Image (cartoon, rainbow, N blue to C red):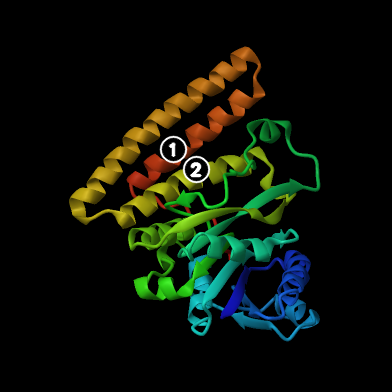
Amino acid sequence: MKITVGILTFRRPESLARSLPVVLDQLGRNPDLDAEVLVVDNDPAGSARAITESVPGKALRYLVEPEPGIAAARNRVLAETTGSRLLIFLDDDEVPEPGWFDALLRTWRAAGRPAAVMGRVQSVFDHDVDPWVAAGEFFRRRRMPSGTELDAAAAGNLLLDLDQVRRTGVRFDPGLGLGGGEDTLFTRQLHAAGGRIVWCDESVAVDTVPAGRTTRRWVKARSWSQGNNQVAVELRLARGPLGRALVRARAVLGGAVRVSGGMARAFAGVMTRSLRHRARGIRTACRGGGMIAGALGARYREYARDA
């Protein structure tokens, strides 16, 4: 059984340099497995090439995917792993904890070989965080018992059974490549086609959050983007014009409720001097605004590039 760890990267060589040796070390601790690492660089200039060439190890491949967007890079990984049974997606800014690889495989086997296993991502900081951001707990990730069934998953730490993926024909939607939400749509379509998705709490990848992402401005933009992506995904899953109209109507109504409720919570936070309520209220309102914008046809491209 061949296993590929697919790492997508875009102009983050320092992060990739931290992650690659750890991943290769964990694969090397399983000599009986046919395992490799595939780095797909979404920078047409190939800025990650020097990093991959500096890391020793035969079980390492490097490719450039020039089409912009994370969906294109993910689809390139799928196209390049036709001989693999399992694929593990890992973001280039995540460093696996000890036992990360073994835990994913163990859960996949124990759960009866589902179509996907989602591992845990833990956010850490190497700098002081804005008290507003800290109070809002915006980087607190969910946890649940291993084996818990899911109907969707993020692809930052995700194992896929490629035999099942190939049978469904599911691919990542390029239309979401620069906005986000492509992994949610992919896994929801996989689940709708009969593929089971389970959680693995013991497989941990650590994400060191850069200072640029711990600002109020970034949190607000990300919340808007999440609401916008939610609607974009629902529209793609809807059936026919009537289904899409219902999605838009629900998004406008739900978004308006979130905007008003979020602002009310933020105001209550001001009155009670609760930084947590102020922060989380603003986050909720921004998400609602993104939903309304999405319902009206506005697409927020969080990962848009200058070049």
Circles 2 and 1: CB atoms closer than 8 Å: yes
**Secondary structure under the numbered disc 1 in the rendered image:** helix
Q: Is residue 92 visible?
A: no
Q: Tell me which amino acid carries mark 2.
A: Trp
Residue at 58% over, 67% down: 89
Which image quarter: residue 134? top right
Residue at 49% over, 83% down: 82
Q: Tell me which amino acid carries mark 1.
A: Gly
Q: x%, y% of residue 129?
A: 75, 39
Q: Which residue is mark 1?
A: 289
Q: x%, y% of residue 88?
A: 58, 68
Q: Which residue is mark 2?
A: 224
Q: Give 181 or 69, whichever is nearer the viewer.
A: 181
Q: Please give the label number shown on residue 220.
A: none
User: In terms of sequence position, does the residue under pointer 2 or pointer 1 come before the other?
Assistant: 2
Residue at 50% over, 49% down: 148
From the viewer's perspective, is 193 left or right of 47? left
